[in-house]
Amino acid sequence: MATVASLALSFIQLQSSAQQPAGGTIAANTNQTEVRPTSDADDRYRIGPGDVLDIRIFNRPNLSRDAVRVEGNGMIRMPLIDTEIQAACKTEGELAKEIASRYLKFYRNPQVDVFIKEYHSKQAAIIGAVNEQSRFELQRRIRLLELLTYAKGPTSKAGQTINIVHAPPALVCEKPLPASAGGSDVASAFSSYRLSETLKGEPGANPYIEPGDIITIPEAEQVYVVGNVYSPLTIPLNEPITVSRAIAMAGGIKQDSRKDKIRIVRQESGSSTKKEMLIDLSAIEKKRAEDIALLPNDIIDVPTASGKSFLRSLLGGVIPTITQLPVRVIP
């Protein structure tokens, strides 16, 4: 969690500047700094700090303005109007109506149009076991599953959990996230869903993405099949896997293998201690022995009939670092 927390802090600080170009852009017709509307059905974009607006006043070119940047406090200024105008939390139409009302004391029935020229206030990021890690500028409200499609989906190594770290609301007009049952602010800043349910579009696992959200998909735990098999490989533990199935996934054993001397090297949980187990694959195939379920970081080593094993070289190299394998970042 320390790593996720530091990522969240860095991203939130990046959000406050609202000046950097995003790693990805989702085209749509709505605003950024996701102002949390009072209704989840309201998908309209709402203006936020850092957004750039074009403001047109019909037959009043001296009052029209290009590239008006919304300040960090959500306000803008317009000619002849003494006070600042709140732009944040409003749609284009709502802001146009507000500006028009301010000019009523100068002109009869002023016609105002507001267009969002650049979107900078509403950003979200997705990292971890996805095919295209990126930061996105959101130009409308979208749900988790849709954002996942823009990241080109989870990788084959993705686990079954998808986590969201929520940034606190940046503006008072934003709707705060609901507190947890225990009233913990920490708990309400973090959500977790089952990836398979999100991919099915189940409503409970497919929430709206909020401004500043960081979505992470951790990689699944893995097991390793090495030695005298046709295709040595690493297998993500997305579901329970037994010894015989793991060997089958590796293409099966070669003819000169010792089926009765297959070894499993298992890292003891929470320590550097390792233990070895000998497995008789022939007995498993004849249902005379249990087909053992593999645990994270297990290594299956299939020796040759001559006794040659890949295990010893692994003991000095791969095994000590298994628990420290880095999360693969896909640029």
Image (tube, helix red, strand yellow):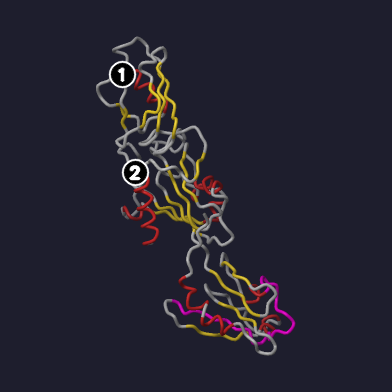
What is the x, y in percent for residue 107?
33, 11
- 104 versus 27 height, above or below: above
- Figure label count: 2
Tell me if 16 is positioned left or right of 123 in this view.
Answer: left
Question: Among all residues in the image, which is located at the extreme bottom?
Answer: 306
Q: CA distance from mark 1 to mark 2?
A: 29 Å
Question: Among all residues in the image, which is located at the extreme right?
Answer: 255
Question: Among all residues in the image, which is located at the extreme top?
Answer: 108
Mark 2 lies on a secondary structure that is: helix
Q: Which mark is residue 281?
A: none
Mark 1 lies on a secondary structure that is: helix
Q: Amino acid at mark 2?
A: Ser
Label 2 CA crowd tier, 10 Å (few <14, some 14–19, many 20+): some
Residue identifier under label 1: 102
Q: Tell me what residue is drawn at x 36 percent, y 57 percent.
A: 6
Closer to the camera, 264 or 227?
227
Closer to the camera, 84 or 197?
84
Label 1 CA crowd tier, 10 Å (few <14, some 14–19, many 20+): some
What is the x, y in percent for residue 162?
48, 56
What's the magenta region?
A: 248-269
What is the x, y in percent for residue 145?
53, 47
Residue identifier under label 2: 16
Closer to the camera, 103 or 221?
103
Q: Amino acid at mark 1?
A: Arg
- 324 versus 171 height, above or below: below
Tell me if 282 is positioned left or right of 69 in this view.
Answer: right
Pick the quarter of the image with the N terminus. bottom left
Magenta region includes residue 73: no
- 3 versus 199 height, above or below: below
Q: Tell me what residue is drawn at x 54 percent, y 52 percent.
A: 132
Magenta region includes residue 261: yes
